Image (tube, grey):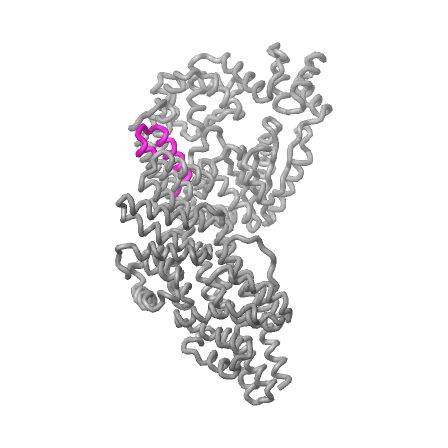
Amino acid sequence: MVGRGRPLSRLSELIARAHAGDGGAVLITGETGVGKSTLIEAAAGIAAQAGFRVLSCSGVEGETQIGLAGLHELLRVIIDRAEILPEQHRDVLFSVFGLGPRIAPDRLQLSAAVLGLLTALAAEQPLMMVLDDAHWMDQPTIGMIAFLVRRVTAAPIVMVVARRPDGAAALETLGLDEIVLERLTESQARSLVTRRHPGLANHLLRQVLDESEGNPLALIELAGAAASGRHDGAVSSLRARLERGHAAQLAALSPGAQDLLLLVAAAAGSVSVPELSAAAERMGLSLDGFAEAEKSGLVAVTGTSVSFRHPLIRSAVYRTAGLHRRVTTHQALAGTLAERGQSSQAAWHRAAATFGYDEPVARDLEDAAAGDSLRGLHGAAMRALERAAALTRDRAGQGRRLIGAAQAARLAGMTGDCRRLAARAAEVAPDAEILSGQAMILLALDLNSGTRTCEPDDLLALGRRFAGAGRRDMVLPMVTSAAFLCRCRAGSAELRDRISEALDALDVPNSGPQLVIAHAVLAPARHAPAVRPRLRAYAGDLTSLSPQLLSGLGTAAEALQDWTLAAGFFTAAAQRFEDGAALADAITVRPEVAFAFAVQGRLGEALAEAEPVRVAARDGDMLVAAAFADAVAVFARAWQGHPVPAAELIRADVDALRAWAAGLSALTRGEPAAAYGALCATARHPDVAAPAIADLVEAAAAVGQADAVRVALEDAERLAEGTRAPLIRSLVHRARAILGEDCEGNFRRALEVPGADSYPLQIARTSLVYGEWLRRANRAAEARAVLTTAATVFERAAAHPWLARAQRSLRTV
């Protein structure tokens, strides 16, 4: 280990801390041949001596099409221990490994199950997890690494991840401690070569040092070649030099041994030794060739595996084989795997042996994708369907398979691939089904990623196009989706009117849930009389509705400012998603539950919902859900006097909620100017603008800007009149009183609105300002009564700033 003392010391310290229960992760970065694997092997030896169990996997070039291939390799020796887990986690892992029920888990479910297994085993014996060559790992495995590294600190687990400088860039965002392996200095390089080849002539030593440029693997390989008289002194890239050296070693083997190594290379580490043996027999090869290859130093053979000494050997073997030999090898692997029931892997090998179009092979890949999806391997399903599309001659079939690949990519969290595949599908086969599928996929990405991938106008135009083509069955989903996205974006009145016109032109029953949702989100004041009773009827029979419709009905109830009804719909939707093992979908809904609780003044329940979902959403790269949950938590804490941290703008409803929180926080600090500046931004979204109206008016009145907010107040009043929403009616009365309009009458009306008592914190806020008004009017007894009532509510909700304000007023009565 020349020149690697300091990195090895850092790894030893990490192992020692983990042994004491303080787990951690480290990223090792270095170019090909710089010694990453050697360093990790030394660290694994230290860990094993300290009593650790070492689990390892390595990315394989050409294996990235196999979803969670790295995870399978890592856990294959412990997957039987999943029996110790709770049933839900056990079934998830067995499903992914093809050992149990097929339940199609999402990424977050699988991540939680893997973490559960690792932490359970680490409680029995400390674990070291080695993930080498991460730059060649499939994206789902990279995502799993990202999930785990945030959590190993709570268990006696060490994670060591190695990659090239230009590989697995997603790992850079995790803030891992990083060990960067540099090339050896000249003195270190000289020491390494002379230790191995002490008799090497000076001129050859100089040439090796110059050409290797301090790369340890190059030093070893070139020095070995020079010592044996094979060094040609050619100047080329490091990888090419090393591959050429391995190719020379390969050429010295017998044809049978070469074919065996090609078989191992083509299998890419995903085939067991018995399956390799069967494929070799199919090709008429003797396994004796493995002994020859092992003697040459190209491979290591154990009772359970055959592995190349370095990944570049695999690429050299595969690149130097002729096309005919590669095709024959893949065909042999496909036949063997098919006989053993490994249809998914067999399909990939048949595809590797196929050029041009081949519908039977495409169908096999499509079947493999279906199986992968059922096991939750959506990344693998995406790649299988994309390859199937490439093997498909007719454009309709290509488009269908590409849109299926796009959907699988969305479920796998592979946003870039999702967009690319959806666009390609629409280009290849722009028929109604493909365009509709593309639109729904992009809408889902838009709502969950915070990135604008489609526009309400695009969905509306597509609906009209379908109508013109006689595809009326596809018009309603497009137009209602346009309405929903318009609401999320706080679209203009002109856009809402155009979508409303398109809805009115539809020849469908007005009582259908999709139309109810669309009408409510577009024009709640106008449609409330018709929509409200239908929403309440749906609320009485939640079991007959899909979780998607329940979530949409929750949004409709929000638009009508019925936050109690909204909380009920969203809670039911989240529970149904969770019961159906759709954890990612549940996470998109849970922030809505928290928001509804927060608006009702149920601060503790809002925080209990928002906090865990914020963490889970971040782990699942669900940016909008994470930002929304964070905004709800910030808003609830603002009531309790906590400051509001700055955040990036992400979406209209989230931004407006954070603005409300900032304004509320400023009001608690007695800073009306700052409050007014923040609260003006609540107009970014109608779901927030109306319930924040009284705060906006209070801040405006305090800084002499009452006239500037009258239009916003009139908008809220129209909404209150149309929807008859108790909260907004009460807040409008309070706002009118603050502006000096029939103060006592409006204060009393605000407190007496039927149903307003469902919002106790807002009633307490009204009691507070009413009590302050009574105190100024020298009506002490009445002031004391309403202020005491307000203080009691504030104390119960831990709304400390408002409690302090009420107590100050009480002391002056």
**Nearest the camera: 370 or 731?**
731
Q: Main secondary structure of the magenta part?
A: helix
Visible residue check, residue 400: yes
What residue is at 33 percent from the left and 25 percent from the top? Answer: 357
What residue is at 57 percent from the left and 34 percent from the top? Answer: 163
Residue 24's x, y, as percent? 59, 45
**Nearest the camera: 28 or 319?**
319
The quadrant where residue 677 appears: bottom right
| Magenta highlight on residue 392 | yes
What residue is at 54 percent from the left and 25 percent from the top? Answer: 310
Does 133 sit above or below residue 663?
above
In the picture, measured across the screen, residue 681 lies left or right of residue 345, that is right
User: Which of the image's four quarters has the N terminus?
Assistant: top right
Residue 448's x, y, as percent? 45, 50
In the picture, measured across the screen, residue 705 lies left or right of residue 519, that is right
How many numbered discs?
0
Visible residue check, residue 791: no
**Nearest the camera: 34 or 685?**
685
Residue 412's x, y, as percent? 43, 42
| Magenta highlight on residue 417 | no
User: Which of the image's four quarters has the C terminus?
Assistant: bottom right
Q: Residue furthest top?
A: 229
The quadrant where residue 12 appears: top right
Residue 59's x, y, as percent? 50, 32
* Magenta region: 376-398
**Nearest the camera: 410 or 688?**
688
